[in-house]
Amino acid sequence: MVSDPFTPGARNASPGTPRQLIDVLAEDLRPAAPVAIGRRLSAAAAGGTIISALIFGLTLGNRPLPLTAGMILALGIKLGFVLSILALALWAAMRLSRPATGGRAHLAWIAAPPLLMGSLAFGQLLETPAGSLVGAVMGGSALACPGWIVLGALAPMIGLLRVVRDQAPTRPRLTGAVIGAGSGAAGAAVYATHCIETSIPFIAIWYGLGILTAACVGAAAGSRLLRW
């Protein structure tokens, strides 16, 4: 009678059973610490952002923003908006990169900054005269803004995808979308230092569109690159 290698006590039945092989392979396996994953994700995001900054410096040039009160306030709003998305996306990506841990519940937090910015934009539009509505929404660079943000997202996205690919994500498309959103936020942070737009509706709509587009790119890449 041949013993079942998958029944209790069969581990030592013979030296070449599948059960014994699995035990040998898993003997030295240790789960990656969440802190280590978080550090790798942060390093990848920082490195990619620096590369994007260098690319923007070469293509857009080093043109300092006017140091007016309105410009400084607008820059602070832009950076607060996109960096909060970046931080929350990295947090969610860290959760999604490990199996048997919840990540979907953390996605609601990523929506909080866009919702807040959208409410501020709506309030500002209500106070804007009808003749100035188009200018408040479109500014002078609406068509270029999302494209630059997506371009700035590519370097951080590549680095983040490489880090998460070494982990064990079980929802590759969702994980890729979160990575794309964080990368788009990183690209938007770089672009903000070159952008002279100060309207909150402009920031909410066009920065948001750039980040959303990067999330779609990340979802497509994740579905291919993050599968086991």
Image (cartoon, rainbow, N blue to C red):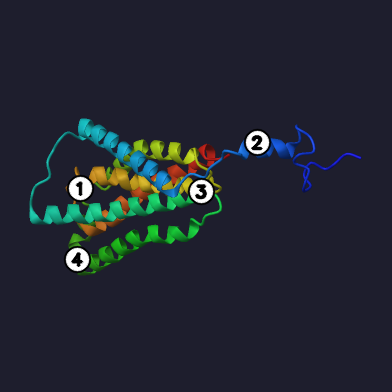
Name the residue at the right extreme: 1
What separation in Å lies between label 2 and label 1 (alpha carbons)?
63 Å
Q: Is residue 206 visible?
A: no
Residue 119 quadrant: bottom left
Image coordinates for residue 148, horizontal then vertical, percent: 29, 40
What separation in Å lies between label 4 and label 2 (alpha carbons)?
69 Å
**Residue under pointer 3:** 98
Under mark 2, the amino acid is Val
Q: Residue at x 52, y 40 (%)?
A: 226
**Residue under pointer 1:** 140
- For mark 3, give the secondary structure: loop
What separation in Å lies between label 3 and label 2 (alpha carbons)?
22 Å
- For mark 4, give the secondary structure: loop
Label 4: few (<14), some or many (≥20) within 10 Å? some
The number of numbered badges drawn on the structure is: 4
Q: Residue at x 44, y 43 (%)?
A: 218
The tag earlier along the polypeptide, 2 or 1, is 2
Decide which of 82, 206 is in the foreground and name it.
82
Tell me whether the residue at label 4 lies in contact with that at label 2, contact meaning CB atoms closer than 8 angstroms: no
The tag earlier along the polypeptide, 4 or 3, is 3
**Residue under pointer 4:** 128
Mark whose residue sits in front, 2 or 1 = 2
What separation in Å lies between label 4 and label 3 (alpha carbons)?
47 Å
Residue 59 to residue 218: above or below: above
The tag earlier along the polypeptide, 3 or 2, is 2
What separation in Å lies between label 1 and label 4 (alpha carbons)?
17 Å
Under mark 1, the amino acid is Gly
Under mark 3, the amino acid is Arg
